[in-house]
Image (cartoon, grey):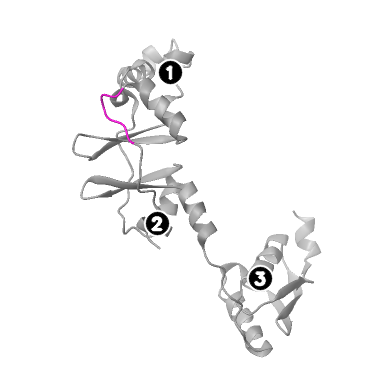
Amino acid sequence: MKARDVMTRKVWTTTLDAPVRKAVQTMIARKVSALPVVDGKGRLVGIVSEGDLLRRSEIGTEWRAKWWSRLLGDVHDDARRYVKSKGGHVGDVMTRRVISVTPTTDILEVIELLEDSGIKRVPVVEGGKLVGIVSRQDILRSMGRARVKRRAKVSDLALRERLQTKLNAQSWSAGLFVNFVVEKGRVELFGLVDSPDQRDAIRVLAENTPGVRSVKDVLAVSTRTLAYA
């Protein structure tokens, strides 16, 4: 799946010289948490988000320099903060360094960007121009549209082997012994694990294996591990 498969194509934008108040009104009216900033040719030049607007003089939350910052602080940082708090145009408050992706960026890479950067959305750019945006909501919507896989018909012996192979491939399963008892697609889990997290992971692994109709967890957690928890 690529960014183009989940992105929102109709994107509300703003411009460098747009009044901050108008940008805020657009965000509220359109129920979006950020607006990409474009120039006259539709090229992405920045983004203004809720985070850019928290420190504003209109609501008395602007940056206030401490007395010692005048001695130890960076005067250039203070100047930038002053503009961001009191500037009247979007260009004064927006974030200029924008993380973006292309329509063909793999969705996994998009998710990793969102997680690593701590952002809620990422613009999609093609040929320098904004063509869409991928937000966390867009990714959730794609999950809601995903088709549920049909249960595959497989013998109990083959299903048991499939479960064991999947378990052996997991980084967290080293040293574990789990017995999968399979009867007509119904799986019972027996064995001893080192933690409740491993027990939950094995249950989820079984539930997500094609051919499994139900899962009964009879796994035991090592009392030695629990004693040190």
Q: Secondary structure at mark 1?
A: loop
Q: Nearer the viewer, residue 152 or 164?
A: 152
- Name the spot of residue 57 as percent of width and height, x first: 43, 14
Q: Amino acid at mark 2?
A: Glu
Based on the displayed image, in which of its 4 quarters is residue 93 positioned? top left
Which residue has dot 3 on it? Answer: 207
Q: Residue shown at 69%/68% (left/top)?
A: 203
Within 10 Å of disc 2 (Cα), the crowding (few <14, some 14-19, many 20+) is: few
Quick one: label 1 or label 2, which is nearer the N terminus?
Answer: 1
Span shown in magenta: 13-18
Which residue has dot 1 on it? Answer: 56
Within 10 Å of disc 1 (Cα), the crowding (few <14, some 14-19, many 20+) is: some
Q: Residue shown at 62%/87% (left/top)?
A: 154
User: Can you see residue 146?
Assistant: yes
Which quadrant is the N terminus positioned in?
Answer: bottom left
Circle 3/circle 2 CB separation < 8 Å: no
